[in-house]
Image: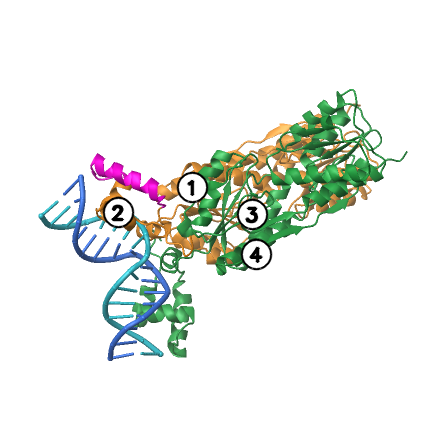
Chain colours: A green, B orange, C cyan, D blue
Amino acid sequence: MNRRHLVTLKDIARELGISVATVSRALRDTYDVSEETKNSVLTKVKELNYRPNFNAMGLVNHKSHNIAVILPTITNYYFSTVITGIQYTAYKNAYNIILHVTGESPEREITIAKELPLSSIDGVLVSVTSESNKCDHLQEIIDNGVPVVFFDRVAESIKTSKVMQNDYEGAFTAVEHLIKRGYRKIAHISGPFSLAFTKERLRGYLTALKKHKIPFNQNWVIHSEFNQESGGADTYKLLSMRDRPDAIFAVNDRKAVGAILTLKKKGIRIGQEIGVIGFTNDPVSAIISPSLTTVEEPASAIGEKSCELLLKHISKKDFIPEEVILKGKLIARESTSRTS
Amino acid sequence: MNRRHLVTLKDIARELGISVATVSRALRDTYDVSEETKNSVLTKVKELNYRPNFNAMGLVNHKSHNIAVILPTITNYYFSTVITGIQYTAYKNAYNIILHVTGESPEREITIAKELPLSSIDGVLVSVTSESNKCDHLQEIIDNGVPVVFFDRVAESIKTSKVMQNDYEGAFTAVEHLIKRGYRKIAHISGPFSLAFTKERLRGYLTALKKHKIPFNQNWVIHSEFNQESGGADTYKLLSMRDRPDAIFAVNDRKAVGAILTLKKKGIRIGQEIGVIGFTNDPVSAIISPSLTTVEEPASAIGEKSCELLLKHISKKDFIPEEVILKGKLIARESTSRTS
DNA sequence: GTGAAAGCGCTAACAC
DNA sequence: GTGTTAGCGCTTTCAC
């Protein structure tokens, strides 16, 4: 009730008049323990509501059944869904997840990594922060023998398993969709250039233009932050140009939402005058009006898959790193519909 | 590199030719250790990149610097923001948070609680699942000496600290706002009746009606799930009534969004014909068109405050439970504007 | 089949 | 100011 003395193996042993070693063995169902003692132990365990001490187990077994998750933010649809996927797989395998949010701060990411209690963590799942290009702090974790798996925002220089969506193909599909709908002057409002997936989406954009022989206009590619406000600001810039685009491919839905809001404010008929397409399939894309065409990201699957891979790295120390690339899916809505 | 031998106090002691105890003392800056040895230890620690073994520390100190967070879901604005608040405070105090998502399943909540490794957790923060009325599994944790603090969805029967928004007052304000704008036939689409905050919001609704001498119509209060779909379904029901309401107070923004979408589909002029007000101030409420009037919940503050309280319970075993009630704020938007 | 004893990495009481 | 020792709760040889 008060100063917690949680019941230990010793308590069980004493009550049963046997040794701690036997109780331990009975519990783990290993070595040969007589059915009889095993049963009596199990009964006592229930009766006393014994819960194993994971600190002690961790100390001797060198494993903790904890995995750390380090990511930029959780207050958006994509990341919160990924975490739910991770949780799901971790839970199924009796792993706990310890959450670390960097808030998009590279310094904080470094501090978190440096201070990670490697002794009470079996592995780590990370999605790097926008601007982090130096990844020594993550490499160091691996060098200490703790496996790391990347998801979504991966560190290119580190050799380990990675799980991402097919950003190149998704972007290509998005832009080709715009072209098929008749848009020709396609802008791209993008994210920080330092991230692999940003570059991949840009590459998809460029390839689609090239394939359809549409000239590329450097001014129409704008790099800024990932949020809605940046999407709005980028759109303002595009609108103020002498040579104005007739479609916007946003690097994610939040920026696309910013774009739509700005276009509406300016009285521009979305779809007709200017088409907009996003990336993610955040629920808001179906709610906003006009609804937003987008490329759906398999967020939940990414969480599950990356956790599965991490678990494999944990159980087989020489597991060969895999790069898994999941496909996105185009979801056409009103923001790219030209009824002309 | 391979089988991880993380560096321990013993390694440092050996390299420096001193005892483990001294190293331990130097590191904790306690007892009197000579400046000289302290410095040499600190240098070695940096050099070898020593990281304390939290399992060992936990074993001897009976504290882990971990807190568990148990909540229904994280894929929505409110909960993900609360967690961010918790994270923020936990991080400042060198605590890790271990995440447990129940997915609104009472059974899973019970399993999670029963299996919580009490020995490697200093406290737990919980927001109960919709239908959980029996809370023995949570009481049991407290009985084992591990403090529990509730946030948002609290268990009324358990005596401990709780942090919530002022649901009664918020609802009252919301409904009074509708009345001031000229709506008289106000419906309430609500959540599962088993939750305290659902009842509180209903109470606020009823009190506002009474204060303004508006008759109460039982048919206009509908209890269902918390999601957008339920909001839409509830709205259909209301629309099909002979005596149709002219305003809807939704228990949260997601249901309000469902209502708006349904009303739009039916061609009803929102604000004019039927007013809609929500609760939360999910970002979507500013994005949807017409934008949604709502009562802002102090999600981040709730996370921070509940974590602070838990930390107090952890450090003072006889900390007297506090119930903290934070205020919401009305944010008027288009969905309740009558230009008549 | 079961017990005794050592040890995981650390802290704390007790010496000196 | 520092070393020695015991012990946190558990697993794991090694005996018997």
Viewer-side residue, B104 vs A145: A145
Mark 1, chain letter? A
Q: Which residues are magenta?
A: B28-51
**Is disc 2 placed on a helix, strand or loop?**
helix
Residue B59 location in percent, x, y?
Answer: 33, 53
Mark 4, chain letter? A
Crowding at label 4, few (<14), some or many (≥20) Cα neighbours within 10 Å? some
Is residue B63 toward the left or the right of residue A140 in the image?
A: left
Report the disc number at residue B15: 2
Q: Which residue is mark 1?
A: A114
Contact flag, marks 3 and 2 (Cβ < 8 Å): no
Q: Is residue B219 visible?
A: no
Report the disc number at residue A150: 3
Q: Which residue is mark 4?
A: A308
Dot in front, 2 or 1: 2
Residue B49 colored magenta?
Answer: yes
**Residue at 61% from the left image edge and 40% from the top image edge:** A196
How much space separates mark 4 and mark 3, taking CA atoms? Answer: 12 Å
Is residue B79 toward the left or the right of residue B38 in the image?
A: right
Crowding at label 3, few (<14), some or many (≥20) Cα neighbours within 10 Å? many
Mark 3, chain letter? A
The residue under label 2 is which amino acid type? Glu
**Is disc 1 placed on a helix, strand or loop?**
helix
The residue under label 3 is which amino acid type? Phe
**Residue at 30% from the left image edge and 41% from the top image edge:** B44
**Is disc 3 placed on a helix, strand or loop?**
strand
